[in-house]
Amino acid sequence: MKFATFAVTAMALAASAAANAQDAQQSTTNVTLYGVADAYVQIANGAANLSRVQSGGLQGSRFGLRITEDLGGGLRALAVLESGVNIDDGTNGQNAFWGRQSYVGLGSAQLGTLTLGRQYGSIYNLSSDFSEFSNVSTGASTAVIGGFGGYEPVRGGTTYSATGNGGPARINNSVKYESPTFAGFKAGA
């Protein structure tokens, strides 16, 4: 059942990409494929010697799609679909295929951006502004060395906490609004 759902989703994405490729000269749709591949070699000597390849040294490996469509009048539609992948064995990094992020939204330079779906909470976005390492230092190596600096958005090598107090970094079924920037400031909820 899961494979059938995945196959249908993959075919729909392929058909959509083909349609967008044909209309690329006439449309203002942008589709960006992006990703991170992060792996490291873990070596431990003690009661038992261990050496192995692990996925996600500083960041979780991922691939994703960022999609924007100009709707005219300063309004744009947007979507992000992002999947985690374990580089060491090729398995899915989350319980769902688009487990890292999957949301849609509308944005405007004058009105701000409204998004719906599985996405980072506003506090997670804010926390990267106060960390010298942004939200990068969240992987397994951070758990070993205990994080960096005074305030870090994610402590202890887990991405389940945006503030170190157990709050989720990514929130299912969420609605998020980000205001446009006014005099260097931006608000979000």
Image (cartoon, grey):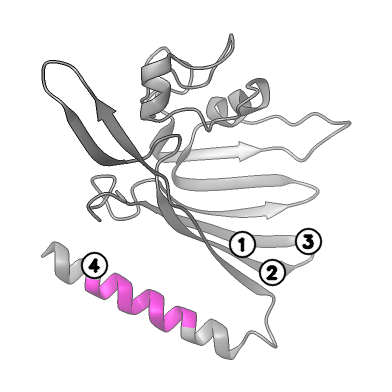
Picture residue at 16% right of the left edge, 71% below the top: 4
* Residue on which disc 2 sits: 71
Q: Position of residue 27 (x, y in %)?
A: 67, 81
In 3D space, how far apart are the residues under numbered discs 3 and 2 (Cα atoms)?
A: 7 Å
In this rendering, the answer to whether 79 lies above or below 175 is: below
Q: Look at the numbered disc 1 and give the secondary structure of its residue.
A: strand
Are there few (<14), some (14-19), or many (20+) residues within 10 Å of tag 1?
some
Q: 113 or 156: which is nearer to us? A: 156
Image quadrant in which the C terminus is located: top right
Q: Is there a contact, CB below 8 Å, between mark 2 and mark 1?
A: yes
Q: 69 or 55: which is nearer to us? A: 55
In this rendering, the answer to whether 46 lies above or below 6 is: above
* Residue on which disc 1 sits: 77
Picture residue at 36% right of the left edge, 18% below the top: 144
Range shown magenta:
7-17
Q: 139 or 82: which is nearer to us? A: 139
Query: Which tag, 2 or 1, sits closer to the chain's start?
Result: 2
Question: Looking at the image, is mark 3 or mark 4 nearer the viewer?
Answer: 4
In 3D space, how far apart are the residues under numbered discs 3 and 4 (Cα atoms)?
A: 35 Å
Are there few (<14), some (14-19), or many (20+) residues within 10 Å of tag 2?
few
Q: What residue type is labelled 2?
A: Leu
In 3D space, how far apart are the residues under numbered discs 4 and 2 (Cα atoms)?
A: 29 Å
Residue 46 occupies quadrant: top left
Question: Looking at the image, is mark 4 or mark 2 nearer the viewer?
Answer: 4
Query: Which tag, 4 or 2, sits closer to the chain's start?
Result: 4
